[in-house]
Image (cartoon, rainbow, N blue to C red):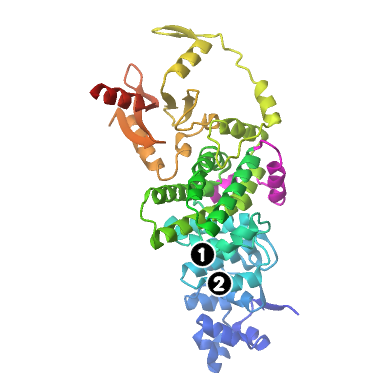
Amino acid sequence: MTKKIDLNKSVFELTQEYPELINIMEKLGFKEITKKSMLHSVGKIMTIPKGAKINNISMMNVITSLMDCGFEITGEMPDSTFTNKLTLSNIEMDGTQKSRTEQIKSYLKRLSAGESLDAVRTDFVREFEKVEPSEIIKAEQELLNEGTPISEVQRLCDVHSALFHGLTTEEKFSNDNSKSSDSNYRKRAEEALAKLDSLPKRDYSNKNALAAEMERIKGHPLHTLSEENKVLSNLITEFNKSRDESILAKICELSVHYAKKGDLIYPLLKEVYGISGPSNIMWTTDDELRDELSKLMRENERGKEWNSRIDIVLNRAKEMIYKEQNILFPICAVNFTKDEWYGIYYDSKDYDICFDTKMDIWDEAENSFLTKKMSNINEKIEMPGGHLTIEQLTALLNTIPIEITFVDEDNINRYFNEGHKVFKRPTMALDREVFSCHPPKIEPMVRQIIDDFRNNRRDTVTVWMEKGGHTMLVKYMAVRDKTGKYVGTAEFVQDMEFAKEHFFSSRG
């Protein structure tokens, strides 16, 4: 028989029906409940929500504890109890989305308050046979939306991952990943919920099957990315067994895999579909893993500390495989259109092969591009310095040995020249805001540069950097018309190895 706690009833009535409530509520902080005089007087007019408010006790902790003890919660919750003004009818254990989201949030809050992972996980496993990745995302996004600092959510990344890992409804690579529950992650973005509410509702009920179907299509981006994940997972497992450091050089190719996600997937999810978690957080994690792995590979001292650090970064990389397969890819499968997948496929051709996983030909996508022809290729463009056809202008810009980007006055990507690029510029990024194309840690710098150009504080920003063993010159320039009005920003990237070779050979 189900035990029900009706929060509209008085504390006295409930304790008469369930005497064990006295001990439960005392542990929660309702100290006066053990005094019979108080229970038989104030208790007859006091409800649990009112008592919690008076004693400054979190009602979510109360609800969680009661459910842990086998009670089903019914009745109305006062609006003042929750900032989002939920009623108890919305958080009953009736299987509704809000019910489960609030429960998941309660476990995350317990972790945030410092409760041990083992204790929280035990309670979680008892209440949930399975949990959908989308439910975890929603819970964490709501925490951020309610004002929880993103740094606090990031601090909880390891325990969040360990709490939920192994309990999602479909787990590819489960044998490998179940061993890495002490690793990383589970961070999501702050503004996603508000934007998601304004977008068409998506049906996620079949997301795993939909992603699996796409992964079976030769040449489909999810097929390629999943194949890369399988190889990476095997490489990490092989290294963990053999400790053969030569394997690490191959594992470092994950930078290509991460670059494709960062350029082709994260921005699309954020800008078009309002799903900001992956772009705000997973992108940052990708960068951290890539940078740490690169740093470790450059170090000569490879003792106990080095091995400990390499194990941590590889566990985090393996955890990322899990999240891609079970969270990121299913979300993409539900949201992305066929044309968007075609675009991702086309742009993926510009990336190096990683883990020896060559991208197969996707006939469907190839056929779609054959039908797209430039109809106005012979149209002339008149300029003060002369005139060119579109074909001539395109060929000229592509011949210049510099990577060119133009961003208009509204911060929208309007043009990339074609050809192989050190800094990838996917065609899918055209007509999207430039800031979405940069990792979170770089975005503030890009915003500052453009703001300086727009407000005439600067005209040029020059950056020298090493990329892929080459010295690169990156130059940002304000583009102004004859009157000095700001009309956009240009970025020029040039490989300067030829200059080094020239000057060094001249000295000889």
Q: Where is residue 414 shown, x and y percent of the image?
A: 48, 26
In the rendered image, which residue does mark 1 sit on?
159
In the rendered image, which residue does mark 2 sit on?
120
Residue at 48% from the left image edge and 59% from the top image edge: 311
Residue at 55% from the left image edge and 70% from the top image edge: 60
Q: CA distance from mark 1 to mark 2?
A: 10 Å
Q: Where is residue 85 shown, x and y percent of the image?
A: 56, 62
Farthest residue toward the top? Answer: 386
Instruction: In this rendered view, identify the residue nearer to me: 160 or 295.
Output: 295
The quarter in which the C terminus is drawn is top left
**Element type at marker 1?**
helix
Q: Amino acid at mark 1?
A: Val
The quarter in which the N terminus is drawn is bottom right
Note whether 246 is above or below 36 in the view shown. Answer: above
Residue range highlighted in magenta: 192-220
Q: Where is residue 495 shown, x and y percent of the image?
A: 38, 27
**Element type at marker 2?**
helix
Question: Is the residue marked by circle 2 packed among few (<14), some (14-19), or many (20+) residues within 10 Å?
Answer: some
Is residue 270 magenta-colored?
no
